[in-house]
Image (tube, grey):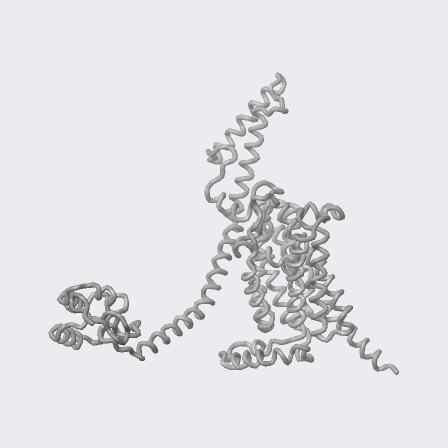
């Protein structure tokens, strides 16, 4: 069937195709034969050519060889609309291209992770540098001078205009003006430089105690994000002691810098470098020399005091010393017990879910066999009793937080402040029903985890373990909230969108580390020995 302008319909495809004259075909063939690669029309360009009425225009497009053609050496098209011939080589090229893109994506993931980590580390290191300390100190001095200036000029309830104090008031006012001029401060009262505003707005909400304002509330949590993070954490727990410790140490560095940035914004200047080095050494000592782990905190505490006495130009304050020791203890020594838990029970008996996990482990083993030889062997066989214990413990802690949130939202009527005023003031939205719900969910998972790990008296021990984890996680959460409220900030950092920084995500896991080490290293083995002894008795 013919159509206008010399076009005919293809009975096979049911679409319009072009049947050019012999002259045009001959010219097109001769032109393409001279090229290094054979070219054909791309689907998008051919559809435009179909709408044209004059074949000489098509011939002109062929001779010009515009960007409407796709070569078979590059990203190949699946068919040639001019001749109606499909190319299997083109299909294979498309598949290879997609496979190559996936490989490039996988290779780029580690680079992206390193880029994110180094960028956030650089930001925190800059925000806690000496220049940042000088800037914060200058801002606080300026604010203090302006406050004095405001009082001297006259406040509603402060009268300094009588005869006896008028002379002293004028002298003090002149001194304030001279100080502000000497510091080159020209902005109005309450203004800040754009750099300071940007730095402080990343973690601050405003005045002290405003962290619970409605405008400062976080957005809704992403369920998908939580699931992805949970899967990554599970892989991390079973990745081997070296990788587990290394990633933990890197996270601790970021957490400590977040903490010290918050502290410095309040005008306190601790020994930052010593505490960061001390925290990392605690993790490494827990991995390679567990018996010397306890000595790290007093040794680095001594080092910090030597630095305060020998390197500072002025006497250090109690706040500076206290925040230094708090950073080493709260964000270094306590979390490093997770490394000691990870080392417990290498080559112990399998759990009840070992048969279900066997295919996955076998697949991972095949993958691991192809790894370079220089990687540690511990990566190939990462399963220990401590690793399984950490997995179920962290699962209880995570779902305790989730259960507390939903139970408190659905049934919460009694505020936590009614039975614990300080805790209620720290987190006004927490309720007693939410705490009970979180401990209940944690206890249920604890019972299941105890059964999987073959604990003796698993119903009782699992439930008790889950409840204690729920309470300790609550204490860690309230501790972080108390610190943030005193500093007047909403989040410790901005690493994870809508979730804050490192400390905002791990606050519930801090105080559970020593307890978990005691349970996994001493309590459970003692209960197993007692159970065997009771069975052996006639």
Seen at 68% across and 78% down, the residue is: 352
In the displayed structure, 327 sits above or below 352; it is above
Residue 257 in view (yes/no): no
Seen at 63% across and 70% down, the residue is: 287
State the quadrant of the C terminus.
Answer: bottom right
Q: Position of residue 158 (x, y in %)?
A: 63, 24
In the displayed structure, 185 sits above or below 242; it is above
> Of residues 198 and 71, which is closer to you in this image?
71
Residue 51 found in image quarter: bottom left
Q: Of all residues shown, which one is farthest toward the front?
A: 1
Q: Position of residue 307 (x, y in %)?
A: 61, 53
Figure label count:
0
Seen at 27% across and 66% down, the residue is: 44
Question: In the image, is 73 to the left or to the right of 500?
Answer: left
Q: Of all residues shown, which one is farthest toward the left?
A: 23
Q: Position of residue 159 (x, y in %)?
A: 62, 22
> Of residues 401 and 252, which is closer to you in this image?
401
């Amino acid at each position: 069937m013919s159509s206008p302008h010399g076009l005919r319909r293809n009975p096979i495809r049911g679409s319009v195709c072009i049947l050019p004259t012999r002259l045009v075909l001959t010219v097109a063939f001769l032109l393409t034969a001279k090229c290094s690669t054979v070219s054909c029309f791309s689907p998008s360009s051919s559809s435009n050519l179909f709408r044209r009425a004059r074949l000489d225009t098509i011939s002109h497009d062929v001779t010009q060889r515009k960007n409407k053609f796709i070569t078979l050496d590059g990203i190949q098209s699946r068919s040639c609309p001019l001749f109606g011939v499909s190319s299997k080589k083109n299909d294979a090229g498309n598949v290879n291209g997609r496979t190559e893109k996936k490989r490039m994506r996988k290779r780029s993931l580690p680079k992206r992770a390193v880029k994110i980590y180094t960028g956030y580390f650089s930001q925190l290191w800059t925000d806690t540098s000496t220049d940042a300390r000088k800037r914060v100190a200058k801002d606080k001095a300026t604010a203090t001078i302006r406050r004095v200036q405001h009082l001297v000029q006259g406040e509603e309830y402060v009268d300094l205009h009588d005869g006896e104090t008028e002379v002293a008031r004028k002298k003090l006012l002149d001194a304030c003006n001279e100080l502000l001029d000497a510091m080159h401060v020209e902005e109005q009262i309450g203004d800040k430089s754009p750099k300071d505003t940007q730095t402080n707005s990343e973690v601050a909400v405003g005045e002290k105690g405003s962290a619970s304002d409605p405008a400062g509330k976080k957005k809704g949590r992403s369920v998908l994000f939580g699931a992805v993070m949970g899967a990554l954490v599970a892989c991390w727990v079973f990745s081997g002691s070296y990788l587990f410790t290394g990633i933990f140490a890197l996270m601790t560095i970021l957490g400590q810098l977040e903490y010290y940035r918050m502290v410095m914004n309040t005008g306190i200047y601790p020994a930052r470098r010593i505490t960061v080095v001390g925290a990392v050494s605690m993790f490494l000592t827990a991995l390679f020399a567990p018996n010397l782990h306890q000595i790290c905190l007093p040794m680095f505490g001594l080092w910090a005091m030597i630095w305060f006495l020998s390197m500072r130009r002025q006497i250090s304050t109690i706040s500076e010393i206290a925040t230094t020791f708090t950073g080493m203890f709260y964000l270094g020594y306590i979390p490093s017990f997770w490394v000691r838990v990870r080392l417990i029970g290498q080559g112990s008996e399998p759990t009840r879910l070992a048969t279900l996990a066997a295919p996955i482990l076998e697949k991972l083993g095949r993958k691991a066999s192809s790894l370079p030889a220089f990687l540690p062997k511990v990566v190939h066989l990462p399963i220990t009793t401590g690793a399984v214990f950490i997995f179920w413990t962290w699962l209880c802690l995570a779902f305790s937080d989730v259960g507390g949130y939903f139970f408190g939202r659905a049934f919460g009527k009694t505020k936590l402040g009614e039975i614990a005023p300080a805790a209620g003031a720290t987190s006004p939205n927490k309720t007693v029903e939410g705490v009970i719900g979180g401990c209940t969910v944690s206890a249920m998972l604890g019972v299941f985890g105890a059964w999987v790990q073959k604990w003796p008296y698993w119903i009782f021990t699992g439930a008790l373990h889950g409840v204690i984890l729920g309470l300790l996680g609550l204490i860690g959460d309230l501790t972080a909230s108390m610190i943030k409220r005193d500093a007047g900030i909403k989040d410790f950092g901005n690493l994870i969108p809508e979730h804050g920084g490192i400390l905002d995500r791990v606050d519930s896991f801090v105080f559970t580390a020593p307890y978990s080490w005691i349970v996994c290293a001493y309590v459970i083995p003692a209960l197993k020995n007692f159970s065997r002894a009771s069975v052996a008795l006639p």
